[in-house]
Amino acid sequence: MSNIEHIHRTIVQGTDVFYREAGSESKPKLLLLHGYPTSSYMFRNLIPLLSSHLHVVAPDLPGFGFTEPKPGYIFDFEALTETIDQFVTKLGWTKFAIYVFDYGSPVGFRLALKNPSRITAIISQNGNAYDEGIDDRFWGPLKKYWAAGKNDPELTSALRAYIEDKRNVDSQYFDGVSDTIAIDLAPSTLDWALLCRGGQTDIQLGLFFDYQNNIRQYPQFQEFFRNSGVPVLLAWGKNDAIFSFAGAEAFRRDVKPENLDIRYFDTGHFALETHAEEIAGAIINFVVPRL
């Protein structure tokens, strides 16, 4: 595999997984896991910066991007993790680092719990694993939804309206960014187009409801951080209103100082949109020598 990004598809238990790949197979391996409401396209600027140092693969999670889930696919985080687990197994990967963001974080951390010895490093870009990081500016309505149950008509209607409003995609890219003119319009435009596909609102509503099960697993994720000894790089947009920087600070409780590097950036949720070069540099300087 060359340093130029290539596009592939592979069938995993009936699901047609779309993924991007670059870098020599002889290099250490890095799995890039995106979040809501985006896809592997969010890594378009990062991949070429890393591909001479790492063998990089970025799949689209089922329900996102161009991955085509099998009929009857159950959209919860356990199923997403199982698909990605089988995906890396099909690639033949036995050791790899993970770059996790937003929804990709519980998927990556669940992968670590399934087989801790596989994970060689963690890079978390606003990828939360602590109660302190759950910012009520975003999560307050979802906490009410979890408490009321998925069939509550008023809360369900409000969340459907949230998912179906393009402004709520754009805000994740622009909020907290001082120089919004620097934000590429292509990713939010693509995200919105993909969210407009039939069935998407139900898929995303189901994942909103299921996220509470990730929070229940936070103590297990934290135990992995304490016991694994893997290097952890946090690249955090400090102005994020979804996963606050308090969630980044909380990693200090469980990761030894010599294994932890925290980088804060003056930006919002999608830090790669404004700081791809700085984040790539941190990966190359802190993570790559430890692989």
Image (tube, helix red, strand yellow):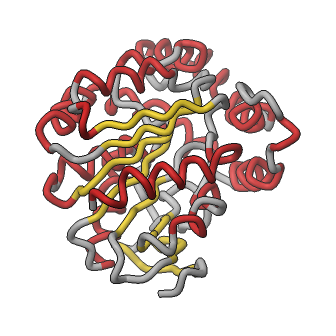
- Residue lying at 53% horizontally and 81% vertically, measured from the top left: 8
**Which residue, as the protein is rendered here, is positioned at the far bottom?**
1
Q: Position of residue 172 (x, y in %)?
A: 69, 34
Up/down of 242 relative to 93, above or below:
above
Q: Is residue 167 left or right of residue 17?
A: right
**Image quadrant in which you'd find residue 201:** top right
Image quadrant where one finds the C terminus? bottom left
Q: Is residue 228 left or right of residue 193?
A: left
Is residue 137 or residue 79 the one in the foreground? 137
- Residue lying at 16% horizontally and 56% vertically, measured from the top left: 115
Q: In this rendering, does residue 200 appear at all?
A: no
Q: Position of residue 231 (x, y in %)?
A: 27, 46
**Which residue, as the protein is rendered here, is positioned at the far right?**
181
Q: In this rendering, does residue 33 appear at all?
A: yes
Q: Position of residue 33 (x, y in %)?
A: 46, 54
Up/down of 173 relative to 278, above or below:
above
Q: Position of residue 189 (x, y in %)?
A: 80, 51
Is residue 122 or residue 157 the one in the foreground? 122
Count of numbered tags: 0
- Residue lying at 52% horizontally and 33% vertically, measured from the top left: 236
Up/down of 247 relative to 3, above or below:
above
- Residue lying at 11% horizontally and 38% vertically, measured from the top left: 227
Is residue 159 or residue 227 the one in the foreground? 227
